[in-house]
Image (tube, rainbow, N blue to C red):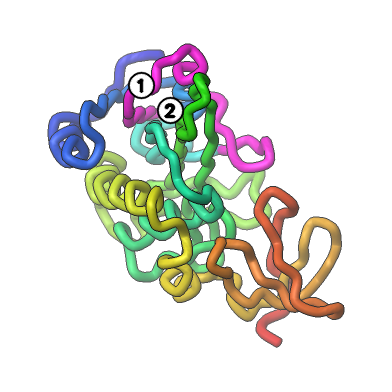
Amino acid sequence: MSAPTLSWPTDALRAQLAPLLPGIGVEVVGEIDSTNSELMRRARAGRTAPTLLVAELQTAGRGRLGRGWQSGDGEPGGALAFSLGLLLAPRDWSGLSLAVGLAVAEALHLDIRLKWPNDLWWQGRKLAGILVETAGTGGGHSDRFAVIGIGINIAPLGGEGFSTPPAWLQALLPGITAPDALMRLAAPLAQAVRAFEPQGFAPLAARFNARDALGDQAVRLSDGTEGVARGVGADGALQVHTATGLRTVHSAEVSVRPVAGEGAR
């Protein structure tokens, strides 16, 4: 890990988050392999105090299903990459990544859409990604240490290596910086996670569906099944109408892609 080069409002972030997450530490590093990986390493070593860890650059960022996550163009400030780690004991973990995505989208811009289960889109292109991981705390406790990783493209990113060039936040909010974006969303994110613990995802389903990027669109599941996405249920599972009926899809099972050139049916 190296020292950061940008100016980050760590004191202001700590003041915002402390009422929601007492004792939280706010750390910013210049470069790290992955903020999620670092907090998971700490959790396995028994370090489970609430922590917001921000990195200006990640050398081995990770996404869902083991995919690599590239954010930014290699320059500090080109992307916002951070992880929030805290102990959680929700009644049901289902839908946590959707609740996180909804909180981020609502904090940033009305036009941001949510692509089930863990991406934020703008105009059909990926703007941000979310990776939620957990580690057991031992001792028979019901809570786990949750690590919520978020990567947001802030500045334009070249389209090389992408089937579709990614979106970036400055196209929606001209002049916004990575520290600005973090100040916008850190407290709403913490509030959403705290509310999720007793309530689960069900109260958020209608708001998620209002921003659903896949709603009424033709989609293809990774097992080859095609159908039409019909929003998410109370547990956050995607509802897909297929030739054999309505199929409930859980994020651990498959990935979902829109079918190119096909719209609603």
Q: Does the magenta stretch include residue 21?
A: no
> Where on the picture, by quarter, is residue 8?
top left
Q: Is residue 104 visible?
A: no
Report crowding for label 2: few under 14, some 14 to 19, many 20 or more residues within 10 A (C-alpha): many
Residue positioned most to the front: 140
Question: Residue 237 appears at what percent x and percent y?
Answer: 62, 62
Which span of residues is magenta-colored? 41-69
The local crowd at label 1, few if under 14, some if 14 to 19, many if 20 or more residues have their Cα within 10 Å, is: some
Question: Is residue 44 placed above or below 79 in the rendered structure?
Answer: above
Dot 2 lies on which element?
strand
Residue 209 or 79: which is nearer the viewer?
209
Q: Which residue is drawn at 45% across and 75% down?
A: 210
Q: Are discs 1 and 2 less than 8 Å apart at CB? A: yes
- Residue type at mark 2: give it: Leu
Question: Which residue lies under the disc numbered 2?
Answer: 57
Up/down of 50 relative to 149, above or below: above
Residue 32 % position (x, y): 45, 20
Q: Which mark is residue 213?
A: none
